Image (tube, helix red, strand yellow):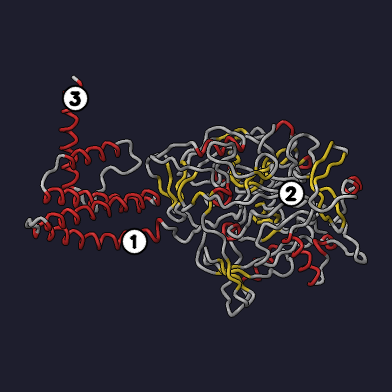
Amino acid sequence: MKKLFLISFVVFCLATGTTNAKTQNSDRAGILPGSIFYFLDILSENIGTLLTFGDENKAQRSLNLATERLAEVEALTKRGDVKQTEKITQSYQEYLDKAVRIAERAEDTGDNVSNIQEKIKRVMTIHEDVLGTIKESFNTEVAGGGFVVVDTAQTSCHGTSSSIACPSSNEDFFGQDAQYISNTPSYTDNGNGTVTDNNTGLMWVQDAGNKTSYSSAIAMANSFTLAGYSDWRAPTIKELYSIIDFSGRDIDPTNSVGGNPFIDDEVFIFEYGDTSAGDRIIDSQWVTANKYVSTVMGGGECFFGVNFADGRIKCYPISGSRGSGYFARYVRGSSYGENNLSDNGNSTVSDRATALIWQQEDSGYGMDWESALSYCESLSLGGESDWRLPNAKELQSIVDYTRSPDTTGSPALDPVFGATPITNEAGDKDWSFYWTSTTHANQSGGGYAVYISFGRALGYMQQFGGWIDVHGAGAQRSDPKTGNSSNYPTGHGPQGDAVRVDNYVRCVSGGGAEFTTSTTLETYSPSQSARQQGDIQQQQQQGRPPFGGRQQDGQPTAQQGTPPQEAISACSSSTSGTSCSFSSPHGAVSGTCINISGVLACAPSGGPPSQTGLPQPPQ
């Protein structure tokens, strides 16, 4: 019985393999990679090839299979599948080369090969035309249709609290942002007050100048001129987010020491909030043209802006503003940030604009950050196994800012995707926060990770009766990587941001991302980094007190602060770099002696000890 089945199966494979090879052309790709039947299709081809005899017949079969591979390449290009396009293109070339080699071998042995050589020449001519069309399509649909997702610039790996050596595939926390790289940030200072992003092609104003109101910022763009250009505009949220830099470190709202802005301040002029003008230090919110389609905080209209001081997207008031207003960094250039989504029919979605391939449905349940990394790294879907947890910019690229729970009854997401509804903290139907692979570092370490809120970005505010949408669907905030949400019954921070810990997951593939081992080990201490020292010097040279603080006869400002006496005493008889320890009100602290604000003091190796045993939340 088994022998009879095997004979029948071989006959079936021969028949289907021969038929496919003869009838396929560039307009009919047949079964594509990702289909559960593709393996059988290739198996039938291999068996047919084994049972093909004679050089002319073998060359002809290789030509037929090359034509079929080319048809698959054409179909995969239209689908936006970068990896499979490249893989099948290589297979096409191998079959074509094989046909040529067979003909050359036959000629060397004295066979008459003029017939097959003519066929090869004719087929190659046809293929050249098809390949030209595919190349044009690849450039516009697969290689990114004007929506290049720039890398986050995060190069350090993190555990649940501090920086760690980047893990291998069999270790915890494998698959995080720093381990994948694509479209490394690259800028050109044009020397005329403008900066060109070499990835997106967008040109930016280098120095935004003084803060202003939202309405004035939008209006002034219409008449703004710089470097001979007058076609400046307020950026969209996706344009502005393209220049966020997650090598930054969140600062304490009352103390700027230890922070780095979330933007390349060696290229762009950046300012923290001016406390003398009523700002908080973290008040460095930047204007975009994207107004929220719903409202926040009891009916308030707002726009989505990026805060480059604390590394977040939130919805800020259109009428009125905190402190002295908002910064406006205008942009010019071709349209950027428009998706081109396609349902692949295999539980995946391709974005031809970014070349990213997405898991169509989400995880269906929430999990902590480490589990989210593992979930994506072990996912097998649509014939692919190279899934990863998306970084912050990748996930933000699919936010649909024309949608919201209150206006469209949906998440801020194109309906080509599935999204699991939840019941939120207010008891309403909603959609979840989604993890990214990007750590949101602060002075205490790397205990928080970035998420994108595709549902309402809730906060607990007593003046509005409790839980309410405070930052809008499409906001980017951060959650503890581990812990228990019950420890935050009224959220965290000034707007009582909801803390869930167990967030949902949507994995990604493609986009040209490559695994990298070129990473750094970041340390956390109250000392100021070189980037921050540069910020201080820059603001002092421009006549502004560092980070909004008031200078007092050369003494450190309140924002700079000084180490506690215990930390200073621990290093009183030591040199820089020596191990140290001391007792604090929250327990024993171990670290390294370093220079802090002009004195040698013991800096904790993992940041200040937690009072609760959980990562200390960013503000």
Q: CA distance from mark 1 to mark 3?
A: 44 Å
| Mark sitting earlier along the chain (2/1) | 1
| Mark sitting earlier along the chain (2/3) | 3
User: 414 or 141: nearer the eye?
Assistant: 141
Q: How many numbered marks appear?
A: 3
Could you say where residue 387 lies in the image, as x and y percent from the top left? 47, 42
Q: Which residue is mark 3?
A: 5
Above or below residue 221? Residue 497 is above
| Residue in view at x 67 percent, y 54 percent | 302
What residue type is disc 2 on?
Tyr
Q: Nearer the viewer, mark 2 or mark 3?
A: 2
Could you say where residue 253 lies in the image, as x and y percent from the top left? 79, 51
Q: Which residue is mark 1?
A: 135
On the image, which quarter does residue 305 sit in? Answer: bottom right
Q: Which residue is mark 2?
A: 524
Relative placement, left or right, of 370 versus 24 is right
Please tell me how crowded label 3 is: few (under 14), some (14-19), or many (20+) other residues with Cα within 10 Å.
Answer: few
